[in-house]
Image (cartoon, grey):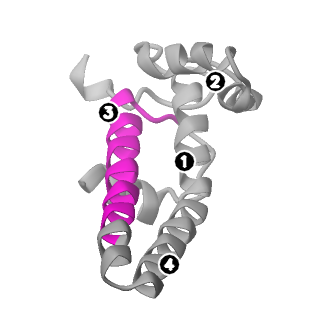
Amino acid sequence: MEWFIKVVKEHYADFNGRARRKEFWMFILCMYAAIIAIYVVGIILGFIADFLGFIFMGIAGLAMLALIVPFLAVGVRRLHDTGKPTWMIVLNFLPIVNFYFLYLMIIEGDKGPNEFGPDPKAGEH
């Protein structure tokens, strides 16, 4: 959860620098867990009263909209960690090609500094 909060509070629209795999994947995990939890509550409340389910579905939609910018920012910083340019974030939105984007999110970042900044794992190598 600390990685999710770090991305949202400190790097909400920060497209500069690098993000390690752990930062990216912990953000993604927490983001999906939060959205799924809101949807589940909405579905359960929808059985009790339709308007409550509708309200929670709206909240889930707003949460997804609010998390688009930090998702793109952490994705771009993750690309920077692998030495790839910012524009490659569009690969995430292209069918079939998005598997290459997934591959880039999984591989280890460049060791040492690259053109986008210092190694975020510098103290661990």
Q: Which residue is mark 4?
A: 54
Residue at horizontal 32 percent and vertical 62 percent from the top: 40
Given the image, on which type of amino acid does mark 3 rest? Answer: Lys
Q: Which residue is mark 1?
A: 71
Q: Is residue 44 left or right of residue 116?
A: left
Q: Earlier in the sequence, mark 4 or mark 2?
A: 4
Given the image, on which type of amino acid does mark 2 rest? Answer: Glu
Q: CA distance from mark 2 to mark 3?
A: 21 Å
Q: Position of residue 76 (x, y in %)?
A: 61, 36
Residue at horizontal 60 percent and vertical 20 percent from the top: 101
Task: Give the image quarter of residue 122.
Answer: top left
Given the image, on which type of amino acid does mark 1 rest? Answer: Phe
Residue 115 numbered tag = 2
Dot 3 surroundings within 10 Å: few (below 14), some, or many (20 or more)? Answer: few
Q: Are marks 4 and 1 in contact (CB under 8 Å)?
A: no
Circle 4 or circle 1, nearest the eye: 4
Query: Taken as a whole, is the magenta stretch helix, strand or loop?
Result: helix
Q: Which residue is mark 3?
A: 22
